[in-house]
Image: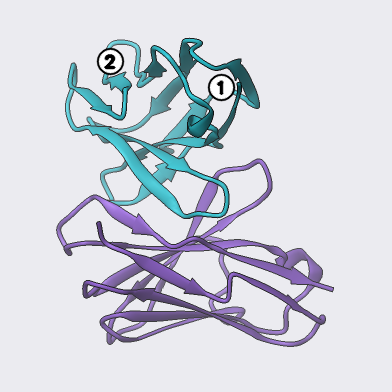
Chain colours: A cyan, B purple
Amino acid sequence: GDSVTQMEGPVTLSEEAFLTINCTYTATGYPSLFWYVQYPGEGLQLLLKATKADDKGSNKGFEATYRKETTSFHLEKGSVQVSDSAVYFCALINQGGKLIFGQGTELSVKP
Amino acid sequence: GAVVSQHPSRVICKSGTSVKIECRSLDFQATTMFWYRQFPKQSLMLMATSNEGSKATYEQGVEKDKFLINHASLTLSTLTVTSAHPEDSSFYICSAPLHASSYEQYFGPGTRLTVT
């Protein structure tokens, strides 16, 4: 079935470090891909999305490119801040219209 | 942006009792809402799709008699965990799309259920 796999956390970085969180997927067809972020005590928020191959989603300095050939959607940010500390979820919408999530990656940024 | 609320945020109950969790769309109407369950350090698992005015659609392996869903209005869906047991302890999250045809969902902050 359809699935999403993320790198395991927690990921601990110093402020201004470069961030990569890997995400790969398995799905029928060409699903839309998403990154959601969950700040402590809050609900999930959509961070960025890409709906077709080679699309790049971007928001708040984060970027991810839809790579069909490697079935990946890695999240990157050039310089993280303490306020980026959160749990990040990669997800896809499958042909049945359901959101399939990865297991989440906790990011902790130290000053 | 659109806001979805959940109540309560935390609840502790004894084994055998029932607990109701509310999910509300605060500034938009939602004909469909989704209920997820999240275990520690794990992904969100879709439990069921709540449909306003009709029966909920449950995912495989989810007991419909245990997790009762009612979507009585365009802004409110409720999840009732009946005869709760410690293994039902989890984080329950709801979401709703802004429009019926939209893939973008807005999530509630979640409800932490602990069954003792």
Residue B59 appears anywhere in the view: no
Image location of residue A103, percent across then percent down: 56, 37
Image location of residue A55, percent across then percent down: 17, 21
Mark 2 lies on residue: A67
Q: Secondary structure at mark 1?
A: loop
* Mark 1 residue type: Met
- Subunit bearing disc 1: A
Mark 1 lies on residue: A7
Which of these two is toward me, B7 or A30?
Answer: B7
Q: Where A72 sits versus B56, above or below?
A: above
Horizontally, is A107 left or right of A22 in the view? right
Residue at point 38%, 76% (across, down):
B24
Image location of residue B103, percent across then percent down: 23, 50
Quadrant of res B34:
bottom left
Residue at point 26%, 20% (across, down):
A66
Q: Where A24 sits versus B106, above or below?
A: above
Q: Residue lying farthest right?
A: B116
Horizontally, is A99 left or right of A8 in the view? left
Q: Tag 2: Cα neighbours inside 10 Å, few (<14), some, or many (≥20)?
A: some
